[in-house]
Amino acid sequence: MDIVALVDVLVVAMPLLYALLVGIYAVSFFLNLASITRLKTPALVFTVGLHVVYIAIRTVAFDHPPITTVFEIMTMLAVCISIAYTYIELRTKASNTGMFILLLAFVFQLVSSLNIRDLTEIAPILRSRLLGFHVSTALLGYTAISLSAVYGFLYLMLYREIKSSSFGLIYNKLPNLEMLEKMSSKSEIFGFIMLTVAIAIGLIWLPKAFDSFSYLDPKLIGTMTVWALYAISLAAKRKLGWQGRKMMIVSLIAFGFVFLSMTVINMYMSGFHSFY
């Protein structure tokens, strides 16, 4: 089997594997069967590992990282969501939120597999491996930060149920407040580290790649502002002892600026720092 044929096999296999993975987490969540629950983490690690292999093989087969179209970016988003969630599950040993998070990865991968094309003719700048690492680490950073906000939101919902003594599905099925705070914190730290790496790579590569490079580009300013907000948030937690509900609210406020940066600034205000 040649390498392009192997890519085509994995294009079909990846959404099927994600569907099976979500099914395993769903059965465990609703029925709590011990035999199925034991399969969750091994199935997760296998699927994520194979997805990383798919990205690597695709990069070699077409001589560029899969970042040149919306549908290539979608498979990158799917693998970033899965990697960030795997990190959180392995660090916290809590897997009850996996069904909801991995469902997003499945949807992104399904849309990608249905529409992705084998591209060999692209702009030379998009063949840069350094650009591939820059985009990959940035996506990992923003994905982990988004997961931190999701766990922060679940924390506040559970906090409200407990305060009102109204115990529903969230109270019965999701982790407790302490664990949700831990999952949000781990996601935030992982996202901050990845975003730091992405910024460092960008500051090295961008001036060499663009004659019109400017540190005043709105997208760069937006990214640095997001990085500074999370640096202040982590410093406040470490130095001032901020925790619990206060930190979850700060996390959601910071995510609001991430959303603004990724939508309005990215789509309408970026200058040289746009490739599509």
Image (spheres, rainbow, N blue to C red):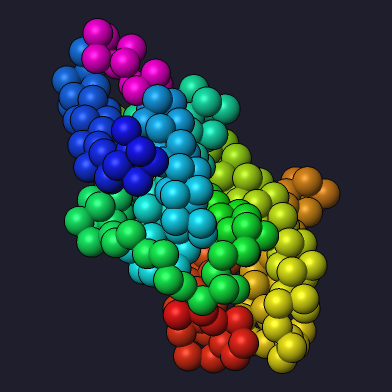
Q: The C terminus is located in which quarter?
A: bottom left
Q: Quadrant of residue 35?
A: top left
Question: Which residue of the protein is positioned furthest toward the top in this rendering?
Answer: 35
The reply, left or right, for residue 193 in relation to residue 91 is right
Look at 72% across and 57% down and name the residue there: 196
Task: Give yes or no for residue 42 being in the magenta stretch.
Answer: yes
Question: Which residue of the protein is positioned furthest toward the front in this rendering?
Answer: 2
Q: Is residue 106 above or below residue 268?
A: above
Say which of 133 and 126 sits in front. Answer: 126
Look at 44% across and 56% down and name the residue there: 62
Look at 43% across and 26% down and name the residue there: 45
The reply, left or right, for residue 52 in relation to residue 75 is right
Look at 77% across and 78% down and name the residue there: 207
Q: Quadrant of residue 190?
A: top right
Q: Quadrant of residue 244?
A: top right
Task: Give yes or no for residue 36 being in the magenta stretch.
Answer: yes
Res. 120 in view: yes
The reply, left or right, for residue 92 in relation to residue 232 is left
Where residue 77 sits: x, y (%)? 42, 54
Magenta region: which residues? 34-43
Say which of 272 and 8 sits in front. Answer: 8
Say which of 97 and 118 sits in front. Answer: 118
Q: Report the number of numbered marks.
A: 0
What secondary structure do most residues of the magenta stretch adopt?
helix
Q: Is residue 132 above or below residue 205?
A: above
Where residue 46 sits: x, y (%)? 40, 25
The reply, left or right, for residue 159 in relation to residue 170 is right
Q: The N terminus is located in which quarter?
A: top left
Res. 161 in view: no
Where residue 158 sits: x, y (%)? 38, 43
Where residue 257 sits: x, y (%)? 55, 73
